Image: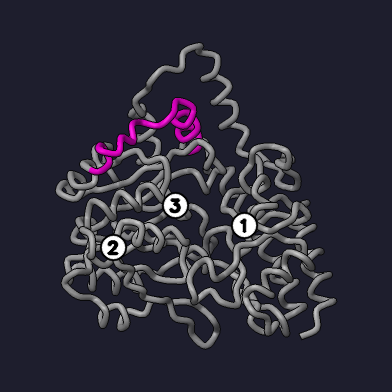
Amino acid sequence: MKYDFSKSAKRAGTNAEKYTLKRKLFGTDEVLPMWVADMDIDTPPFIIEALKKRLEFPNFGYEEIPSSVYAAQIEWMKKHHGITFSEDELLYSHSVVASINTAIEAFSNEGDKVIVQTPVYPPFFKSVTSHNRKVLFNPLVQDENGKYGFDVKDMVSKIDKDTKLLLLCSPHNPVGRVWHREELELIAEVCLKHNIVVFSDEIHSDLVYEPNKHISFAGLSQEVRDITVTALGTGKTFNLAGFAISTVAIPNKELRKKFKKVHENIHFAQGTILGHTAMQSAYMQGAEWLLELKTHLQKNIEMLENICLKHQDKISFIAPEGTYLAWLDCSKMGLSDKELRDFFVSKAKLGLSAGTSFSKEGSGFMRLNFAVSTDIMSQAVRQLDDALREFLC
């Protein structure tokens, strides 16, 4: 089947977070919002059809997550990522951020340290401090070409007896790296040696572009599997964030017991009926749609690359290996972070995520979400092109 990604439903005027918060975040409604990580691409039609069918049954009382949902996810992970989890290793969570907070409570105590590799999605470090733990900052490093990598030497130098947990972002938000097996093995070696639990956020794992391949951290070895908590879900891949459904895979019984204690105290329950329906449909029917989506996203990447090449004296961009997030290096523009944000809002009329929100290492950068229709992407690059042409360094 051929899916059309050229246009999408108009979300302005709905309760879409990306649109309703424009004035609050940017001080104006006159921006094209490309910040929060959901898609301005319609949710797949086969999921909508599955939801319509479920709505025909007129009872929406409490429902356990059906085994068929977990079975669909297990089969998807096995087929697409070469890793197998069992149903008893999987737990429902309404979001990755909720799972991060649960893991911090489950695997550390107040005053303990949690490793965070910046620049990174802000809840990684904010969740640590909100639980009265200490952030052990282990910033990513860039090579001569601007490509990011782990700084294992720095990590090892900072670890002590109070370091209990590492929050791994794989693929990485916002820099777009898809970590190689060799890179992950270096991290695993350190964590095994120091008895550190790894929380691996793999919510973007389906959104990886060839020739890159996602390697699940838990799949490195049996030893690594026993120290890993993996966050998974359909929210990013199939634009289902509004259903508030994801899972956490915890093969190790002792870790699962600790996690479940916090999980049950908070009372996560079992999610929503329509969330179950959407997730199962996505995993059972979504392979072809995902292939076409990634082709579309790569076209959007090319559009953005061309604009950045045209204005390479002002802005640069390394195409992401995974995710639908572009990490734009605007340091050549010579602006302060406030001035840079103001340029994108007032000149380019684009509502992006400021690089500094991902930590101090994000200074001089902006994050742009390119998971949009062709129409919206075309408008965005036109606006950026016009603004950069008028900008004098």
Question: What amino acid type is highlighted by mark number 2?
Answer: Arg
Please say whether residue 99 is visible from this viewpoint: yes
Q: CA distance from mark 2 to mark 3?
A: 24 Å
Q: What x and y, as percent, mark residue 373?
A: 71, 50
Question: What amino acid type is highlighted by mark number 3?
Answer: Ile
Q: CA distance from mark 2 to mark 1?
A: 28 Å
According to the picture, the residue beneath numbered tag 2 turns out to be 133
Residue at 52 percent of width and 69 percent of height: 175
Q: Is residue 42 above or below residue 35?
A: above
Q: Earlier in the sequence, mark 2 or mark 1?
A: 1
Residue at 50 percent of width and 67 percent of height: 358
Please say whether residue 193 is visible from this viewpoint: no
According to the picture, the residue beneath numbered tag 1 turns out to be 35
Q: Secondary structure at mark 3?
A: loop
Q: Secondary structure at mark 1?
A: loop
Residue nearest the viewer, comparing 200 with 362: 362
Residue nearest the viewer, comparing 86 with 198: 198
The question of residue 281 being in magenta is answered with: yes
> Which mark, by number, is residue 203?
3
| Mark 2 surroundings: few (<14), some (14-19) or many (≥20) residues within 10 A | many
Region of the chain picked out in magenta, as a range = 262-282
Quadrant in the rendering for residue 215: bottom left
Side (left or right) of 213 relative to 93: right
Please state which of the two labelled residues, at mark 2 or mark 3, is closer to the viewer: 2
Q: What x and y, as percent, mark residue 298?
A: 64, 60
Residue at 55 percent of width and 43 percent of height: 238
For the residues labelled 2 and 3, say whether their Cβ atoms are less than 8 Å apart. no
Q: Is residue 79 above or below residue 393?
A: above
Quarter the C terminus occupies: bottom right
Residue at 35 percent of width and 38 percent of height: 92
Question: What amino acid type is highlighted by mark number 1?
Answer: Trp
The rendered magenta stretch, by its main secondary structure, is classed as helix
